[in-house]
């Protein structure tokens, strides 16, 4: 009986610890399986562009992933050569893969019901380098409560304008 009680107590502690980690470490999140390995961003943002499109971005010290979509409305956004929506992955600021090159294909699905000021959805795509010599595949991608704000990589943190009489 003591073993069962100890096992139950240990399970409760482990489950509680995992729950805390999920809330703390994964909100917001932009992550996926990149060529079978984990890609996770440490910074995320969604930006409304002047032309009505939206940019969803995430980066870590070595990688950047950006989606440029026709809007932030819930729905399916098709990626591929000739499509108005694009995914761009950059490694170490140099090697770039795009869904507007080669036989690229994929989609981003933005969901409804995300808290106000955030975007949630999922994605998968195949992209190529500019000369279509190398391929990058992103699978099981997650966009989770990424907030609207300043574009990733921008030097601007906040911009406030006021007129004083």
Image: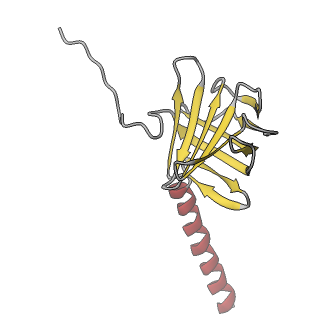
Left or right side of 140 for 31: left
Q: What's the colour scheme?
A: secondary structure
Quadrant in the rendering for residue 81: top right
**Which residue is outermost to the top?**
165
Q: Residue at x 64, y 24 (%)?
A: 71
User: In the rendered view, would you say 163 is above or below 105?
Assistant: above
Is 156 left, or right, of 133 in this rendering?
A: left
The N terminus is located in which quarter? bottom right
- Residue nearer the viewer, 13 or 149: 149
Which residue occupies the foreground of this view, 58 or 19? Answer: 58
- The picture places residue 69, in percent across and down from the top left corner, at 65, 28
Q: Which of 31 and 130 is in front in this view?
A: 130
Tell me: 89 left or right of 134: left
Q: Which residue is drawn at 58% across and 36% down?
A: 56
Q: In which quarter of the image is residue 87?
A: top right
Is residue 89 positioned above or below 112 on the image?
A: below
Q: Residue at x 70, y 29 (%)?
A: 85
Establish if 46 lies above or below 92: above
């Amino acid at each position: 009986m003591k073993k069962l009680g100890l096992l139950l107590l240990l399970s409760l502690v482990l489950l509680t610890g995992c729950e805390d980690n999920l809330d703390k470490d994964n909100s917001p999140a932009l992550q996926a399986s990149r060529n079978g390995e984990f890609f996770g961003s440490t910074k995320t943002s969604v930006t409304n562009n002047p032309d009505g499109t939206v940019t969803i971005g995430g980066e870590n010290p070595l990688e950047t992933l950006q989606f440029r979509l026709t809007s932030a409305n819930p729905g399916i956004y098709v990626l591929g050569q000739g499509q108005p929506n694009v995914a761009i992955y950059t490694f170490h600021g140099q090697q770039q893969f795009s869904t507007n090159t080669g036989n690229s294909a994929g989609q981003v699905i933005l969901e409804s019901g995300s808290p106000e000021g955030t975007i949630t959805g999922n994605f998968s795509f195949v992209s190529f380098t500019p000369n279509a010599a190398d391929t990058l595949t992103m699978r099981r991608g997650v966009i989770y409560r990424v907030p609207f704000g300043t574009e990733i990589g921008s030097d601007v943190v906040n911009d406030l304008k006021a007129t004083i009489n």
